[in-house]
Image: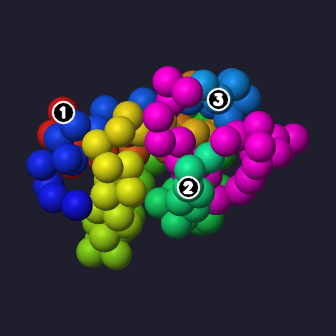
């Protein structure tokens, strides 16, 4: 896939507990842990990118504590800023092939979660 198609990808986030819709486009679960009580059929994923999720240590340290949000974001961005993670991002964008990307996550907090950070990273990569 050419870099040109990356510019077409719009990136959105959606909780795993919201129903999938055709408008979601390319659906990617970005959690290391499968969302409790959700089946493969219900989630209707195109991909599970558990390795793009925060490391186990970072996830446990954060614990979805909003007071740790700023530091979590920086630490997660640092984790994403490796050649291996950049390769994963490139692969994800290539697989989406210019379609809308919906990052699916299981956290209850809709404002303080890894999908929000990853959305920002992917949006910058796709030229938004």
Q: Can residue 75 be seen in this view?
A: no
The residue at the far right in this view is: 37
Tag 1, which secondary structure? loop
Q: Where is residue 70 in the image (x, y as percent from the top left)?
A: 39, 39
Q: Of callouts 1 and 2, which one flags the residue occurring earlier in the amino acid sequence?
A: 2
Real-space CA distance between mark 3 and mark 2, rounded to the nearest whole angstrom: 14 Å
- Which region of the structure is painted magenta? 22-44
Decide: few, some or many residues near mark 1? Use Cα within 10 Å; few <14, some 14-19, many ≥20. few
Q: Position of residue 81 (x, y in %)?
A: 28, 64
Q: Of callouts 3 and 2, which one flags the residue occurring earlier in the amino acid sequence?
A: 3
Residue found 61% across the figure and 40% down from its top:
105
Residue found 42% across the figure and 30% down from its top:
12
| Among the 4 quarters of the image, the one containing residue 65 | top right
**Residue 18 within the segment the image draws in magenta:** no
Q: Where is residue 29 in the image (x, y as percent from the top left)?
A: 59, 48
Real-space CA distance between mark 1 and mark 2, rounded to the nearest whole angstrom: 22 Å
- What residue does disc 1 label? 128
**Residue 28 within the segment the image draws in magenta:** yes
Decide: few, some or many residues near mark 2? Use Cα within 10 Å; few <14, some 14-19, many ≥20. some
User: With 48 as the anchor, is 115 left or right in this view?
Assistant: left
Real-space CA distance between mark 1 and mark 3, rounded to the nearest whole angstrom: 24 Å
The residue at the far left in this view is: 4
Tag 2, which secondary structure? strand
Q: Position of residue 56 (x, y in %)?
A: 62, 64
Residue 35 or 46: which is nearer the viewer?
46
Residue found 56% across the figure and 50% down from its top:
46
- What residue does disc 3 label? 20
């Amino acid at each position: 896939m050419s870099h040109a198609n990356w510019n077409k990808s719009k990136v959105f986030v959606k909780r795993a507990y919201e129903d999938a819709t055709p408008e979601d486009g390319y659906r990617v679960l970005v959690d290391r842990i499968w969302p409790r009580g959700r089946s493969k059929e219900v989630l209707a994923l195109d991909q599970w990118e558990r390795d793009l999720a925060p490391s186990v240590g970072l996830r446990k340290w954060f614990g979805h504590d909003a007071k740790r949000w700023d530091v979590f974001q920086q630490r997660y961005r640092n984790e994403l800023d490796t050649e291996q993670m950049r390769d994963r991002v490139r692969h994800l964008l290539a697989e989406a092939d210019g379609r809308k990307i919906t990052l699916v996550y299981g956290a209850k907090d809709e404002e303080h979660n890894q999908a929000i950070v990853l959305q920002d990273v992917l949006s910058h990569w796709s030229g938004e």
